Image (tube, helix red, strand yellow):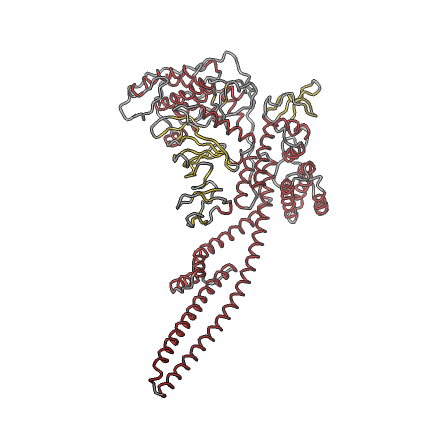
Amino acid sequence: MRFQCGFCGSVMRDLNAKNLGAQVECPSCRHLQVLPSSPFGPGRIIGDFVVIQKVGEGSIGTVYLARQISLDRNLALKVLSIKYTNRKGIASFLAEARTAAKLNHPSIVQVCAVGEDNGICFMAMTFIQGKTVRQRIDEDGKIGVDEALHIVQQVSEGLHFAWTEENLIHRDIKPENIIITTEGAAKLTDLGLAISEDECTKGMEISGTPFYMSPEQFAGEKLDTRTDIYSLGVTLYQMLSGQLPYKGDTLNTVAKQHFYEKATPLKKLDSSIPSEVEKLVGRMMAKHPDDRFSNIEELLNDVWKIRQKTAPSKDMVPGVHTISIKKLDYKQPQPSPIPHKSFQSGKIPKTPFKAPAPEADEENVRINKTLIFSAMGAVLIIVLVFVFVFADRAKRLTNIETELLPIEKHFAQTNSVSLEIEDDCKKLLQRIGTPKTEADKAIMFRLKFLISEMQIRRLAQENLRLKDEMSALEKKTTVKSNNLTSSMKEDMLELAAEKDAEIAEIEQAFEKEKKQWQDEKEALNRKIADFGKKLEHEKKMADEKLRTVFFAKYYSAIRQCKFTEAAALLKEFSGKSEISPEDLARFNEQIARLAEFHTAFTASGNKYTKTATPDGIVIRIVDEEVDLNVSGSFSTKKWTQLSVESLAAIALKAFPDLPEKYVKSDICLLLGKPGDAISFSPDHKLLEMVVNSAFYTGLDSVKSLAETDKKKALPKFQILQKEFDGIPKFSEELQALKPSLEDSPPTLSSPLGISPPKDASK
């Protein structure tokens, strides 16, 4: 990692994760400064850009305000999330950058550069100061009629340019992707899902934000610019009413609403909305593309006509294909309202879509998190308490040690003795008070040793001063000795003898005290060394417990196909434990891969049609069900009923470059067969750690429960035995525990709180 020095502006190179949040020295100006705790904090250099601050976060990355070093200008720097830094994610990221770079239009955010820096993919865009339409709706509740139409007019200009120049379809029009600048201009951003008409084919992968997707997007039909008109219509509906037209709780429910239900009329939500505007939104949101505006040009003309009546002044309405760069003033008097007309619904589609047949809404299944973590609660609480106590103690000692280190450094580099420094040490000693821990004692001994060394130095300096005085006195005595009487000489000799005796006594006391403090110093060093070993051991034990808890929770999340939760667990774990970049990347790759496997097995539609598997030839995959052609007969199975080999045949279509054994191993994890997963990949060390942690966490839970309730312990034992069947070292431990539980009738439930997938046992 590289950071820019906050004092001289030079580049500090070769920094790593251990330096984050710590004090480092600039190699150029030698100033000490504390780096931010985040790897993308202020001062981080990525490519030709210096991060200033975080300004937003999207679905696949984070956006920062950054300064371009070479051209000395501020830009928005979008950094691809580690979760998506894989072959597919990088390809999509580069496609977005190249697409946006082709479009130079005032209503589209311009991309200036794209690149990669040590595995970090980034894209630099024009920095826009303003708010998204989503933020405006959240703050104001809704947006005025003419201002909303003004936004739609400007966004439509950008969409018209993208369509006429490159035949591009945005596919993700929504309030979050429209920015209103401080000057009042509307700009369209996030072309991550944009696609040209030539690349758009029937049956392609479905992409978009469900609340704003057109019916043909859900159906996987071939798209054109009319799908963007639909999404822009939903956005306009939300701007005018402050709410979405369709608000289902599940993806399937939202899709059915877009296909079959009519949105609540705008005039019913707000009677002040003109009928012409209500009709405009209704036509934009027509179910069938043929009933919408045929193109953006037609939409722009209609919006311009309506704004002749809704705008306070006609001068505020730019002509079609004219970009307005001035901020509209809505404080001037409003025109009289347009007479309202009754709402007329859109036309009935002439040609029905191949829409999915309406089904009864699936019952929402809510997972009780208390049950998921109850088996691991005791271990987790102990680890958290230990970490909290350790962190609190370390913070208190760190504050004192931070003040002590520069004092020790100054004392070691100079021979001067300062009473002020000695007083500072005594004040730190008072702050420790009565030592309660070995760490307190270690700091206390360091302070006492520092104070004693200062006193020893002061005695040594006093000794030298006395010797200098004696030397000067002897010189004077030698000069005047010839003139002194014998009596005076005897007095001088006697005085010299007294001084010698005094010096000898001081030296003797000094040596005695010096030896005493040296002994104490050696004892202190031994205690510090012992404390360091103990602290390192405690840290190692805590880290091992933390890793065990993480791997068990990670397996639980994967087992339940909760990939977002697994990624969040990995992020949290990487911040608390030392995990190598290679292992972190492997975990992220596995999560992304498993997520794609699950999507392929549950909702890939016609993508894997004609794929031959041992269970039959795939026809399509929808709602976790696989339609198969078995020797000319039609059959439907849940994906969990398919064999590992059949699922692998589908997965290898998505990842043809992956070794088959790793694909089968991952599929076994999804099916809750860790034993089979190990057998397919016996050399997979990370997989072995995950399976070991999941097994021993479950085993400890069974043992703990068996002490109080064997009837409840036995079914958990049986599930554990079924999930980890085929691993010899686990079988031995399970066989040893089995006799003590067999006197109870079985009642199946997972020891880790994990419910098997539907029909997994069939």
> For this view, does 541 lie left or right of residue 511?
right
The answer to whether one can see residue 65 in this image is no
Total number of numbered discs in the rendering: 0
Say above or below: 24 vs 298: below
Q: The C terminus is located in which quarter? A: top right
Pinpoint residue 357: horizontal percent, then vertical percent. 56, 19
Q: Quadrant of residue 277?
A: top left
Q: Quadrant of residue 646?
A: top right
Picture layout, residue 414 above or below residue 91: below
* Quarter residue 335 falls in: top left
Question: Which residue is painted at 65% across and 23% down in the image?
Answer: 611
- Give percent across and percent down for residue 70: 41, 35
Residue 99 screen position, x and y as percent: 47, 25
Task: Work out whether 578 lies above or below 618.
Answer: below
In this view, 334 is above or below 574: above
Asked whether 99 or 759 is in front, the reply is: 99
Q: Give the percent coordinates (x, y) of residue 270.
A: 37, 23
Spot the residue most to the top: 350
Q: In the image, what residue occupies the spot 38% across and 63% down? A: 420
Q: Please say whether residue 733 is visible from this viewpoint.
A: yes
Which residue is most to the left? 333
